[in-house]
Image (tube, helix red, strand yellow):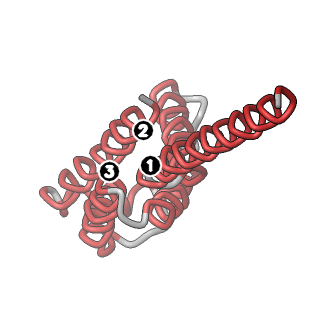
Amino acid sequence: MATIAALIGRILLGALFVFAGLGKVMDTAGTAAYMEAESPFPGSLALFVGIFEIVAGLVLASGFMTRIASLALIVFTALATVFFHEKVTDQVQAAMALKNLAVIGGLLMVFAYGQARGRMDLADERAKRLDAEVRAAHAEGKAEGATTAAKTD
C-alpha cells in the first residue's frame, strides 16, 4: 500500500510542475512580463523555466532519477517562493508561499525515500529471511527428533 501511495504522490507532484511549465511555455510573453515585474530575473528565461518544469516534472513522475529531480525541484520551488511570493502580508501571496512550502515538504519525502522500486527489494529481503527461518526451524526439529530417538534407544 505504501508503494502505491508513494507512486501516486510522486505522479501528482510531477503533474503540478508539468502543468505549470506548460502554462509558461504556452504564454511565454506573459510569463516573461511577470518575471521582469516581480523578480530580478530577465524575461528571456521564461521559456527555459517552462521547459525545465516540464522535464523535471516528467522525470519525477516517471520514477527515473527521483532524488536528483526532487532536489532540483526543491531548489527551484524555494527560489520561486523567495523571489515571487515574498509579500507574505498579502493573503494570496502568503497562501502561495505556504503551498510552495507544502510542495517542498512532499519533494523532501521523495528525496528521502527515492523511487518505489527500492521497496520491492525490501519484500524480497523479507521473503528470504522467512525462508531462512523456516529452514532453521526444520533443522531444529530434525535435531530435536534425533535427540529424542537417541534417548529412547
* Horizontal and vertical percent position of residue 21: 25, 56
Q: Who's the residue at 48% across and 33% down the image?
A: 99
| Residue at the spot of label 1 | 120
The quadrant of the rendering that contains the C terminus is top right
Q: Residues within 10 Å of mark 3 (few under 14, many from 20)?
A: many
Q: Who's the residue at 70% across and 33% down the image?
A: 141
The quadrant of the rendering that contains the N terminus is top left
What's the distance in space between the residues labelled 3 and 1, CA to CA?
Answer: 27 Å
Q: Which mark is residue 54?
A: none
* Horizontal and vertical percent position of residue 20: 27, 49
Closest to the observer, 147 or 3 = 147
Pick whichever of labels 2 and 1 is earlier in the sequence. 2
One can see residue 81 in this view? no
For the residues carrying marks 3 and 2, which lies nearer the camera in this image? 2
| Residue at the spot of label 2 | 3
Closest to the observer, 76 or 86 = 76
Q: Secondary structure at mark 2?
A: helix
Q: Secondary structure at mark 3?
A: helix
- Image position of 76 (left or right of 28): right
Picture mark count: 3
One can see residue 29 in this view? yes
Q: Residues within 10 Å of mark 1 (few under 14, many from 20)?
A: few
Closest to the observer, 69 or 127 = 127
Q: Who's the residue at 45% across and 28% down the image?
A: 92
Outermost residue on the left side: it is 26
For the residues carrying marks 2 and 1, which lies nearer the camera in this image? 1
* Horizontal and vertical percent position of residue 7: 36, 42
